[in-house]
Image (cartoon, rainbow, N blue to C red):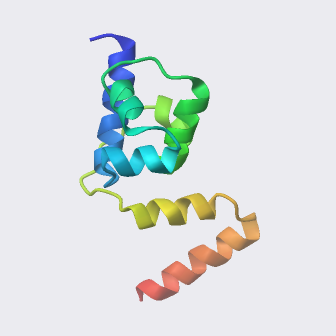
């Protein structure tokens, strides 16, 4: 298996574990379904395209290229949206959000 196929496989795993279909991730990434399919099969993609895919998946490029962390539970699209929104919060807002989440769990 070559590096491009490995990248494509990683995208496919992340897509499926995040609950995206090929069509929904392509739409969220701003690329065509057929192009995303080609990338998953090993076609080269630009850094810009990879960044768009990662953004739609709710991860950074650093997280994408970092170590693989296996999860036993898929993460929903809604949770990915919350994560994307939380990345734009100030440290104070993030602390308030954490406090709110903890209070909701009680």
Which residue is the extreme one toward the left?
72
Quadrant location, the N terminus: top left
Evaluate whether residue 85 shows in this view. Answer: yes
**The image quarter in which residue 3 lies:** top left
* Residue 69 screen position, x and y as percent: 36, 41
Q: Residue at x 71, y 72 (%)?
A: 93
Quadrant location, the C terminus: bottom left
Q: Residue at x 32, y 44 (%)?
A: 22
Q: Nearer the viewer, residue 27 or 60?
A: 27
Q: Where 78 falls versus 38 (above or below)?
A: below
Q: Nearer the viewer, residue 103 or 52?
A: 52
Q: Nearer the viewer, residue 31 or 66?
A: 31
Task: Please state if 100 lies on the left or on the right of 20 as rendered.
Answer: right
Which residue is the extreme one toward the top?
2
Task: Please state if 92 lies on the left or on the right of 43 as rendered.
Answer: right
Evaluate whether residue 59 shows in this view. Answer: no
Tally of marks: 0
Q: Residue at x 30, y 43 (%)?
A: 70
* Residue 96 screen position, x and y as percent: 66, 78
* Residue 74 screen position, x and y as percent: 29, 56
Q: Where 81 falls versus 33 (above or below)?
A: below
Q: Where 99 falls versus 43 (above or below)?
A: below
Q: Where 22 falls versus 20 (above or below)?
A: above
* Residue 81 screen position, x and y as percent: 51, 63
């Amino acid at each position: 298996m070559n590096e491009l196929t490995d990248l494509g496989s990683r995208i496919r795993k992340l897509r499926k574990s995040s609950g995206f279909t090929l069509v929904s991730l392509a739409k969220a990434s701003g690329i065509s379904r057929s192009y995303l399919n080609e990338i998953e099969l090993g076609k080269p993609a630009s850094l810009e395209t990879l960044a768009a895919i990662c953004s739609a998946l709710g991860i950074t490029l650093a997280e994408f290229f970092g170590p693989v962390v296996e999860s036993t539970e898929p993460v929903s699209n809604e949770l990915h949206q919350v994560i994307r929104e939380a990345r734009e919060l100030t440290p104070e807002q993030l602390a308030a959000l954490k406090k709110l989440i903890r209070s909701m769990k009680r």
